[in-house]
Amino acid sequence: MRVKRVEDEENQFIRIAEPILYPNENIVGVQYNINVINKVNADVKQINEVHNMRYFFKPEIEELLKYNGLRLVDCFDCYTLQTIDTGWISSEGAFVKLLEEGNEVIMPTFTIISCAAALVRRKIKPVLVDVDPTTWNMDVTQIEDKVTWKTRAIMAVHLYGLPVDMDAVMEIAQRHHLYVIEDSAEAHGLEYKGKMCGSFGTISCMSFYPNKHITTGEGGMVLVDDEQLRDRCISLRNLCHSPHRRFYHEDLGYNFRMSNIQAALGVAQLEKLKEHLEMKRTIGADYQERLKDIDCVQLPVKRTKYAENIYWIFGMVIHKDILMDAKEVMLQLADRKVGCRPFFYPMHLQPVFRKMGLFLEENYPIAERLAEKGFYIPSGLGVTAEQREYVAEQLKTVFEV
């Protein structure tokens, strides 16, 4: 049974993404006040078993490390920043091992900025490709032409509930002897041809931010299948203490440790992952049915030849011949107390990168159209059937259906 939150009905606003709390007589409810999500109800079933802030290699973290069934994984969080995502974590950890200054990494322009920022901080050049107009993931047909003698890796970012076409990525990577960096921040439980996303990359990373399918409040997980890379991640996570003498450092590391309390939260959430995936697909199917008569928008693809959508978010793209853009629609929905959020803004148009002289002559029309016309509606685990019905009614009103 889910705990029902009591709110002032007159001020009730349907949030874009909200996790859920499962009650239990031994459960402590923890509410996280995060910037974008006003109130997050998190499942903390095992926190009552945690008696102190044990940081790593403890039972709860070891249990969390079993995620995905991979042989070698490492969990860490960052206490030095208010917010952090796994793209940034992977860069500040594993990129130190994999990549060097002057290398190039092929990646989608349509993604969150942390993916590119991770490279730029280390003077590694992001080489961009456009996105597939149907799946909204990187267009793998453009990768080959971007490979140069400086290319060292392909960054595959699984977006919004569907995976990148990994067969194509892996074939190019193997032929050109490239690393694969797999950003699975939004892909908990997502499978590509029956194989779990997060298990393809030389290094893969996941996010446990509150709007993901499972959460630890913040932080994430790095997955590797190489012992040396694993040891490097573990060392960087904890300030690069020498294995022979503590407080003796031959490298500069970071304070990325995840607390045992966070891991306990993650273990409890992990037990619900299958249920959460079913809930997400139910939410997606419900919206697909309710919104099918809105002819002026493109709804998410239900499935491809290699995957079934897990609907991390339920997005839509307004057709280009419609005068309204996503901003106008979102403002109208906000007036009706429906939370929305725009799609990602392309890397080649980001002011911070253009000020650096990056991507100045580059154009990626599909990504630009998605940024202008794309947005997503409340589709977190906490959204109810009644709320989805209301959201659909308001969308039909806005689009005059």
Image (cartoon, helix red, strand yellow):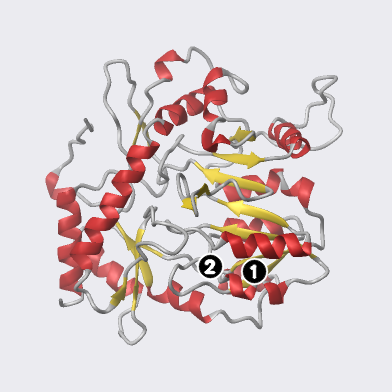
Viewer-proximal residue among 59 and 115: 59
Amino acid under disc 2: Phe
Q: Position of residue 38 (x, y in %)?
A: 34, 44
Viewer-proximal residue among 106 and 167: 167
Residue depicted at x 61% and y 38%: 80
Q: Position of residue 253 (x, y in %)?
A: 75, 36
Query: Image check: 125 left or right of 394?
Result: right
Residue depicted at x 26% and y 52%: 283
Q: Position of residue 322 (x, y in %)?
A: 30, 84
Considering only vertical position in the picture, is 44 above or below 120?
above
Viewer-proximal residue among 337 and 77: 77
Q: Which residue is mark 2?
A: 110
Within-10-Å neighbours for mark 1: few <14, some 14–19, many 20+: some
Classify residue 3 by image quadrant: top left
Q: Which mark is residue 235?
A: none
Residue depicted at x 55% and y 30%: 66
